[in-house]
């Protein structure tokens, strides 16, 4: 039902833009928690767009509850798997494995691939703290400056952080646009797009990585290498590979004529919640090997504290998306759809980039933008209004949002300070290195995504 009576297209768009600006200012300038800022903006927008007061509670409940019924468990399991790998030293074991394969002849490539793999289950901030000592050690053994290696590591971590589930941001975005049961498509596209975006970052790190080199190395960073060292690499890789394989089985069941009983089992195992739950169980041998089963309770408690804010911010974004649908705002978009459709996947990229640059958090930028876009299968969503009505189109939108969420990392982003502080880069030179590199990566990614959309949609 549309409640936008008597409002012109221009006035409605201006009202929506003003609400988004207010939300950004509340988060970035007034230091309001993103959960309250997004939820408050959604309620204010509902009132201003004419949603009757009696309907607003139902809209809030629908938008908020939809996240918990859809992707909350996926976020929790993904976060918990990453925490287990972090605490047991599994993340460092992954890094050491890649280092051995690539060798010291290609140290920048080694650190970039290490970051790309480690950040699939582990948050990029934590991943950098854990792995940066390996880069410094590798720089010493190969006789190169550590700064190019630190930038390469930062790029690899950041790329998978914004593009590849089960990292909470991309997995939340996939659920919010209707791809919670098609995560394999998002993982596949995320892997390709993230790797392609790393190509210019690789050369940037080599050419400009000497800028701002700092001889001071954080004591915490040095001590991070004292993580458990005798971790079985196979056990560390298992929680990453297993859910991908299980979701692939689910896709095979949907695309082929398997016997009914086999298809039922494959479909069940391929559900993201089930696949990640099994992946979490596969972490138990790693905990047993490290004699850390007694610490699993504390690891779980810590993971829930990490996942909780992400889930609630995502749920608040769900409320914003529900308001956009319930108010009939999408009808306005459809009326002026020619100009916005011309932007294609650049439209969600720009929204995410504005949010990222303004408030710093890639996860908040991803989830908030995805909530505005809505379900690709919903005729009343912004996705539908912009012509993104297929799973492939929805997956490309998720990629565009991820590209925006890496554009750019600067002083209001905690990752910026982790990279400069633990990477041996002077803070004043962070803009010339980290910020410029993430800008190049984001623009490269959206160019590739826009080209893919033009050829495939």
Image (tube, helix red, strand yellow):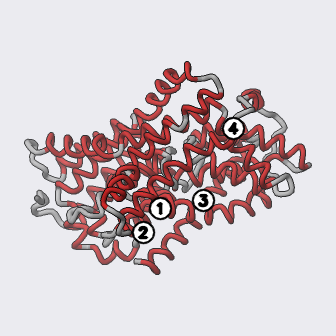
Q: Which residue is mark 1?
A: 399
Which-is-in-front pick, marks 4 and 2?
Answer: 4
Q: Secondary structure at mark 2?
A: loop
Q: How many marks?
A: 4
Residue 232 image label: 4
Q: Is residue 173 left or right of residue 64?
A: right
Which-is-in-front pick, marks 1 and 2?
Answer: 1
Mark 1 / mark 3, whichever is N-terminal:
1
Tell me where residue 320 appears, x and y as whole percent: 28, 48
Residue 445 appears in the figure: yes
Q: CA distance from mark 3 to mark 4?
A: 37 Å
Q: Which residue is mark 3?
A: 439
Q: Is residue 395 left or right of residue 177?
A: right
Mark 1 / mark 4, whichever is N-terminal:
4
Q: CA distance from mark 1 to mark 3?
A: 16 Å
Residue 369 appears in the figure: no
């Amino acid at each position: 039902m549309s409640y936008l009576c008597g409002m012109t297209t221009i006035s409605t768009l201006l009202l929506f833009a003003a609400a988004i600006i207010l939300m950004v200012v509340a988060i970035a300038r007034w230091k309001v928690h993103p959960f309250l800022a997004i939820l408050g903006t959604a309620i204010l927008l509902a009132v201003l767009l004419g949603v009757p007061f009696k309907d607003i509670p139902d809209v809030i409940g629908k938008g908020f509850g939809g996240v918990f019924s859809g992707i909350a468990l996926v976020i929790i399991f993904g976060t918990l798997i990453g925490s287990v790998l972090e605490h047991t030293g599994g993340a460092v074991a992954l890094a050491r494995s890649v280092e051995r394969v690539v060798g010291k002849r290609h140290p920048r490539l080694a650190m970039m691939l290490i970051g790309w793999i480690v950040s699939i289950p582990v948050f990029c901030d934590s991943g950098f703290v854990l792995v940066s000592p390996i880069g410094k050690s590798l720089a010493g053994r190969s006789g190169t400056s550590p700064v190019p290696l630190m930038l390469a590591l930062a790029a690899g971590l950041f790329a998978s952080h914004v593009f590849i589930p089960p990292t909470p941001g991309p997995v939340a975005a996939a659920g919010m646009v209707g791809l919670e049961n098609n995560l394999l498509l998002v993982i596949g596209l995320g892997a390709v797009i993230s790797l392609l975006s790393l190509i210019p970052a690789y050369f940037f790190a080599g050419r400009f990585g000497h800028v701002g080199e700092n001889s001071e190395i954080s004591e915490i960073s040095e001590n991070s290498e004292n993580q458990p060292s005798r971790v079985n690499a196979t056990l560390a890789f298992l929680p990453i590979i297993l859910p991908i394989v299980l979701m692939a089985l689910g896709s095979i069941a949907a695309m082929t004529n398997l016997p009914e009983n086999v298809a039922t089992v494959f479909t069940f195992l391929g559900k993201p919640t089930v696949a990640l739950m099994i992946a979490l169980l596969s972490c138990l041998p790693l905990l047993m090997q490290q004699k850390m089963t007694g610490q699993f309770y504390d690891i779980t408690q810590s993971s829930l504290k990490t996942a909780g804010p992400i889930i609630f911010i995502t749920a608040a974004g769900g409320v914003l998306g529900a308001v956009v649908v319930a108010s009939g705002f999408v009808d306005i978009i459809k009326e002026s759809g020619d100009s916005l459709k011309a932007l294609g996947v650049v439209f969600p990229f720009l929204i995410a980039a504005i949010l990222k640059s303004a408030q710093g958090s890639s996860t908040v930028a991803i989830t908030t933008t995805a909530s505005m876009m809505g379900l690709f299968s919903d005729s009343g969503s912004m996705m539908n209004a912009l012509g993104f009505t297929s799973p492939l189109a929805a997956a490309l939108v998720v990629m565009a949002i991820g590209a925006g969420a890496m554009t750019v990392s600067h002083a209001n982003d905690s990752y910026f300070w982790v990279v400069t502080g633990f990477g041996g880069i002077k803070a004043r030179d962070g803009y010339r290195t980290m910020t410029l590199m993430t800008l190049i990566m984001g623009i490269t990614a959206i160019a590739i995504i826009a080209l893919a959309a033009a050829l495939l949609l």
